[in-house]
Image (cartoon, rainbow, N blue to C red):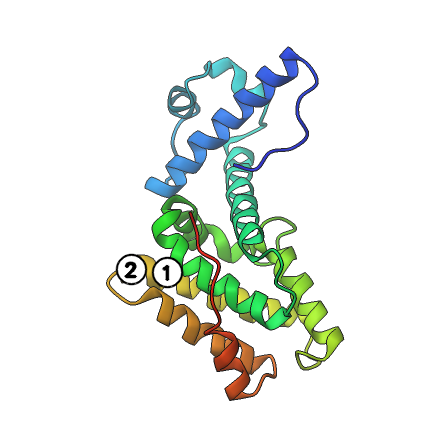
Amino acid sequence: MPTSAPPRNRFERRRAETRQAFIRAARQILAETGDTSASIQAIAERADVGFGSFYNHFESKTELFDAAVTDALEEFGQVIDERVEGIDDPAELVAAGFRLTARMADSHPELMRILRDRGLTHVHSERGLSPRALRDLERGIASGRFTGTDPTTALSALGGTLLSLVALRLARPELDGDEAASDLAEMVLRMLGLCAEDAHEVTRRPLPGLD
């Protein structure tokens, strides 16, 4: 899971571990049932920490579940970042994001279930894949690789299409996920201004694998 700067002493380490245990438990609940009505006591038991420590870290369950979604989105973004390192073409980065996401339905199912159920409200989040995608869109527009559409509007279209892909992969696991992802990525790239031949070629380039 995502990590911040290492705690400086034993107290801070324990505090950070307790907070992360709550977030991990909340992520499991979101992935399994999506039911945020679970009691704080039940969450604390799942996290294997004391009930009384909850309010040392969160003001409410809403804050905890928001933190859990943010944590999942940031891990998602980091996984993609690790796989696309070294790719400079903004179009290839967009395509790789789609294609790797499709594969993560198998390799990271918890993340994908949270993304499917909670991702729409975080399309313009400052964490996760959104700021990375916005960066790539802005670079593509500035370089002329993409047409001069507004990058924030383009992000909405890209994010919505990506979430549809996640829902498709989870609902229809028998489908060829790689092919579906490539086809959707190709449509998005054409929307961004690439010609049909170029968009097809980009979305069929060798793809970094997932562990």
Query: At 66% across and 25% down in the image, what residue appears?
Result: 6
| Residue 46 is at least partly visible in this image | yes
**Can you give x and y, in whole percent of width and height, for residue 115 in the image?**
45, 52
Badge 1: how crowded within 10 Å, few (<14), some, or many (20+)? some
Pick out the residue farthest to the left: 174
The kind of residue on which mark 1 rests is: Ala
The kind of residue on which mark 2 rests is: Ala
Left or right, 181 with respect to 143, comes to: left
Left or right, 129 with respect to 110, comes to: right
**Can you give x and y, in whole percent of width and height, for residue 158 in the image?**
54, 68
For the residue labelled by badge 2, is the local secondary structure a helix, a strand or a loop? helix
Q: Name the residue under label 2.
A: 171
Question: How many angstroms separate mark 1 from mark 2 (CA)?
Answer: 6 Å
Q: Is residue 160 above or below residue 23?
A: below
Residues 24 and 75: in front is 75
Left or right, 29 with respect to 173, comes to: right
Residues 146 and 64: in front is 146
**Can you give x and y, in whole percent of width and height, for residue 114 in the image?**
43, 47
Q: Do the residues labelled 1 and 2 touch (CB within 8 Å)?
A: yes
Q: Mark 1 points at which residue?
A: 167
| Residue 33 is at least partly visible in this image | no
Badge 2: how crowded within 10 Å, few (<14), some, or many (20+)? few
**Can you give x and y, in whole percent of width and height, for residue 118 in the image?**
47, 51
